[in-house]
Image (cartoon, helix red, strand yellow):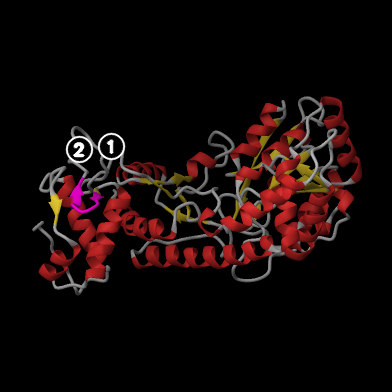
């Protein structure tokens, strides 16, 4: 019988305490690789707990790679005590080499709620259409119609179908726009902000100008003069998770008009809000200067490789001309799949499931961290939150300690646009969409322990 101590007066679930005790015993060498654990029934009887508690603890250890089940033989220890120095904080066991990692980094979609039957139906419907005889540089007409309906229904943006261009995703669209700008043009980008967009701009020969953000998003007055465009995420600032209030939106478009900017509005997860309806898009306020960018990658899957762009006619014409001249254009297969999902109603049903699931996951994350005394910032929206930390050293230590426990987490430092120019507050950017719900529930107690014990 392994050494286990359960405190029924503690606020932590018994299954979590049991898993922690067994994990510590395996990491410390008390339980060795190959040791057979008692059956869930035997252990439940010995500890005077329900079998549900022991089964949940074993399931968590198997998911983390500390244990493995063998049909007809039982559950055995897999993890061993590590040799040499470890990256975890003192007193924290580290995961064994090769154990699975729970990915708590932000940016991936929630595939667990995707209806695979609907997904297959959409691909079959797309495959039933005739193959293309030639390129279509703008977009598949069915995709344009689907996006038009989607924007009106979910984002309140009225637009003609002909005004929608298909893209290969947000970063691809930013790169296309950048290649239309004069060489040496300067484009403002949020700092901290989305580094793939900044990378697409730099790859096109554009000078990226870091612009600070605060609790209300991009600081409009701090954007330097001389930029030709500004890239921003007003609905849910990436990565700090705040939305830009109406007064600042008006100030942004007023300055863009006055100084001749383009405003590149990345609405990467604008469909995902859980408290109130989203504020109107910048594109609805100022369609003459705003380029609206959307993507299917965050609400469905990057498999489609599909996004959309709504822009003023002259910019749209320039993009189509460049695609025609170079022969580059987004693939129509993903466009047709998205159109099939929209036409059947499966896309709307998926978004309802997704909002419900992610709202519940966000509540789980916020509640668990609050019970452990950790503060969470960011609006009730999207699929990530920020956990503030006390300084860059603490951020680096927590990221390293979490990795030692089998959790992949992200610090704010990775999202800086400029080298120290606008140094953001330290913290974790914590995503909750990628793991399965059970994985997330099992990972949160580990994360809170890391936060509590890491210097």
Q: In the picture provided, is 429 more to the left or to the right than 74? A: right
What residue lies at 31% left-to-right and 49% top-to-bottom?
A: 64
The residue indicated by pointer 1 is 97
Quadrant occupied by the N terminus: bottom left
Front-most of residues 62 and 95 = 62
Rendered position, 160 above or below 223: below
Q: Residues within 10 Å of mark 1 (few under 14, many from 20)?
A: few
Picture disc at residue 82: 2
Q: Secondary structure at mark 2?
A: loop
On residue 359, the disc is none
Q: Is residue 293 above or below residue 326?
A: below
User: Considering depth in this image, is 153 or 141 the residue closer to the camera?
Assistant: 141
Compared to residue 156, the image places residue 258 above or below, namely above
Residue 452 appearing in the image: no
Give the residue drawn at x 72%, y 27%: 204
- Determine the residue positioned at 25% across, 60% down: 57
Residue 75 sits inside the magenta stretch = yes
**Is residue 78 left or right of 158 when viewed as pictured?**
left
Prevailing SS of the magenta stretch: strand
Res. 443 in view: yes
Q: Residues within 10 Å of mark 2 (few under 14, many from 20)?
A: some
Mark nearest the camera among 1 and 2 is: 1
- Do residues under tags 1 and 2 come within 8 Å of each other at their CB atoms? yes
Whole-percent x and y of residue 388? 44, 54
Q: Which residues are magenta?
A: 68-77
The residue located at (13%, 65%) in the rendering is 42
């Amino acid at each position: 019988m392994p050494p286990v101590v359960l405190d029924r007066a503690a606020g932590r679930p018994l299954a979590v305490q049991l898993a922690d005790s067994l994990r510590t015993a395996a990491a410390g060498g008390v339980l060795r690789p190959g040791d057979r654990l008692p059956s869930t029934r035997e252990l439940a009887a010995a500890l005077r707990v329900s079998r549900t508690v022991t089964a949940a603890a074993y399931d968590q250890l198997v998911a983390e790679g500390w244990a493995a089940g063998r049909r007809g033989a039982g559950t055995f220890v897999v993890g061993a005590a590590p040799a040499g120095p470890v990256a975890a904080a003192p007193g924290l066991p580290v995961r064994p080499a090769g154990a699975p990692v729970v990915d708590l980094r932000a940016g991936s979609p929630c595939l667990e709620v995707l209806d695979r039957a609907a997904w297959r139906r959409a691909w079959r419907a797309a495959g039933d259409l005739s193959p293309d005889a030639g390129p279509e540089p703008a977009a598949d007409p069915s995709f344009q119609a689907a996006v038009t309906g989607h924007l009106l229904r979910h984002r309140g943006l009225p637009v003609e179908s002909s005004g929608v261009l298909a893209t290969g995703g947000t970063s691809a669209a930013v790169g296309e726009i950048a290649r239309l700008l004069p060489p040496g043009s300067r484009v403002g980008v949020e700092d901290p902000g989305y580094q793939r967009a900044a990378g697409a701009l730099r790859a096109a020969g554009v000078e990226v100008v870091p612009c600070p953000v605060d609790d209300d998003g991009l600081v409009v007055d701090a954007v330097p003069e001389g930029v030709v465009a500004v890239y921003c995420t007003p609905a849910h600032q990436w990565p700090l998770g705040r939305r830009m209030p109406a007064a600042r939106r008006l100030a942004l478009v007023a300055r863009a008009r006055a100084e001749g900017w383009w405003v590149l509005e990345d609405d990467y997860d604008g469909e995902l809000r859980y408290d109130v309806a989203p504020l109107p898009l910048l594109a609805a306020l100022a369609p003459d200067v705003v380029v609206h960018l959307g993507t299917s990658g965050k609400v469905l899957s990057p498999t489609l490789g599909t996004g959309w762009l709504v822009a003023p006619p002259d910019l749209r014409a320039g993009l189509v001309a460049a695609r025609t001249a170079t022969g580059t254009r987004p693939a129509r297969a993903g466009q047709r799949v998205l159109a099939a999902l929209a036409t059947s109603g499966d896309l709307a049903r998926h978004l309802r499931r997704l909002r419900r699931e992610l709202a519940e996951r966000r509540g789980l994350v916020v509640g668990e961290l609050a019970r452990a005394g950790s503060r969470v910032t960011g609006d009730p929206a999207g699929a990530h939150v920020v956990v503030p930390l006390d300084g860059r050293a603490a951020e680096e230590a927590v990221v390293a300690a979490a990795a030692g426990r089998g959790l992949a987490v992200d610090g704010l430092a990775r999202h800086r646009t400029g080298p120290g120019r606008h140094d953001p507050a330290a913290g974790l950017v914590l995503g909750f969409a990628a793991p399965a719900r059970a994985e997330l529930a099992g990972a949160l107690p580990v994360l809170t322990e890391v936060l509590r014990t890491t210097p």
